[in-house]
Image (spheres, rainbow, N blue to C red):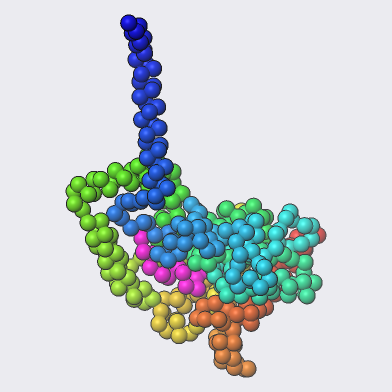
Amino acid sequence: MDAPRPKLPWPRKLGLCAASTLAALGGLELLLRLTSFTHFPAILPPIVWNDDEDRNLRKKLGMFVEDPAQLWVPKPGVEVPYGSAEGERINSQGFRGPERGERRPGVLRVFALGDSSTFGMGVPYPDTWCAQLEAQLAREGVQAEVLDGGVIGFTIDQGLERWEALGRSLHPDVVVAAFGAINEHLWCQTLPDRPKIDERKRPKGLAGFLLDCRYQVRLLHLSGWVLDTARGEDREAMRERLREKRRQQDAFNVNAGQPDWPGERRVGLTRFAAALDELDRRVRAEGARLVLVSMPRHPEREAAAPVLPLYNRAVLDGAARLGAPCFDARGAVLQALTGPPERDFEELFLDAYHPNREGHGLIAAGLAPLIKSLSNESSRASAR
C-alpha cells in the first residue's frame, strides 16, 4: 500500500495557486498581444495637438514626440524633410541646426523661440532666419551663434515651457520670441494651452494610473469586451456620437477669426499679453535680454480673420511696455508689397504663413541691427 502523500502546508498551496494564476494570466496577456487584440474605452482620446498630428504622436511617426509640458517637441535624430537633400536631422539637443556646446568667450548666444515660421517649415536650415541672422551678424563683425528653438504649431505658452526645458540651460545672451502669427488665435478644441499644460504637468495620481492600465493591459481590454458584449453596447455608435459633438464644435468655430467670437482660443489676447510679460521676467532673471518679433502673414488671411492683427498689436504694445527691442516683420512685409520696388507676396512666402528663403532673409535683416546693438551694449558693460 502506497504511503499517503504528505500534505503541503497552506502557505505553499497558496503560493502555488498564485503562481499558477499569474502564469495563466501572463500567458493570456501574451496571447492577446500576439493576436493584436484591442478593445479601448469608448471615448475619443484627449486632443494634444489635433486629430491628425495626435495620431502621428501616438504612433511615434513624423518629426515630433509628446512632451508633458511642451505638449510636443522635435524628436532628436529624426530627418527634417525640408533639409533631406543636405541630410539634415534634428540635433541631439532637440532643435534644428548644428550642435552647440559650452558657451564660447566673446561669442554672443541668441536663442530663438517661435512657431513653424521660426522652425523654418518648408525650407532647409541654411534658409531659415536663424541661420541667415547668424551669417549676417558675422558679415557685420559680430561673433554670434543663433540657436533655432522654434517648433511647428507652438504658441507662446508652449514657448514659455520650452524656455524652461531647453532655453535656460543653453545660457543665451539674447532671446528672440516670434509668436502670434496664427496658432494662438485657433480654437482650443479641449482646453486652452495654459490649463492644458498645467493639467498634463500635474502628477497623474491613482485615477491616471488606472486609466493608463486600462489602455495598456490587454487583459483589461478583454474584460471590457466581455462587459460590453454582455450589455449589448454598440461602441462604434457611441464613438460616432462623440465625433458628431466634435463636428458640431468645428462648425461653431468657423468664425474663430472674428475678434468678438465667443469661444475659447488656444491663447486669448489677454493671456497672450500676460505671457509676453512672463517671458520677459523669466529671461531677465537669467541675465538675458528679450527681443520681440511681430510676425507677418498674407493680408488676405487677415481680412478673413481680423483678430490676427490684434496679436501683432499686442506684440508691439508688449515691447513698448517692457522696453524690449522689437522688429515689426509684418510691417516690413506690407511695406515690401507696396514698394518701391513693389513685390509680390509669393516672392517672399511659400504659402499664407511660411516665409521662403527671401522672406526669412527679410526677418534676419530686420533683426540684425537690434541684435548688434544689444551685442554692443553687452561689450560696453563688460569693458566697464
Q: Can residue 54 be seen in the rendering of this structure?
A: yes
Residue at image point 50% right, 81% down: 352
- As drawn, is 15 to the left or to the right of 277? left
Q: Position of residue 286 (x, y in %)?
A: 64, 54
Task: Give the quadrant of residue 283.
Answer: bottom right
Residue at image point 41% right, 76% down: 307
- As drawn, is 200 to the left or to the right of 237? right
Q: Position of residue 312 (x, y in %)?
A: 50, 75
- Does the stretch in magenta take in 184? yes
On screen, residue 338 above or below 4: below
- As drawn, is 181 to the left or to the right of 166? left
The outermost residue toward the left is 231
Q: Position of residue 159 (x, y in %)?
A: 53, 61
Q: Can residue 130 be seen in the rendering of this structure?
A: no
Viewer-proximal residue among 203 and 222: 222
- Does the stretch in magenta take in 367? no
Residue at image point 44% right, 43% down: 203
Q: Position of residue 183 (x, y in %)?
A: 46, 69
User: Mostly what secondary structure, the magenta segment?
Assistant: loop
**Quadrant holding the N terminus:** top left
User: Total label count?
Assistant: 0
On screen, residue 151 above or below 19: below
**Quadrant holding the C terminus:** bottom right
Residue at image point 67% right, 68% down: 87
Task: Give the quadrant of residue 133.
Answer: bottom right
Magenta residue span = 177-190
Viewer-proximal residue among 357 and 323: 357
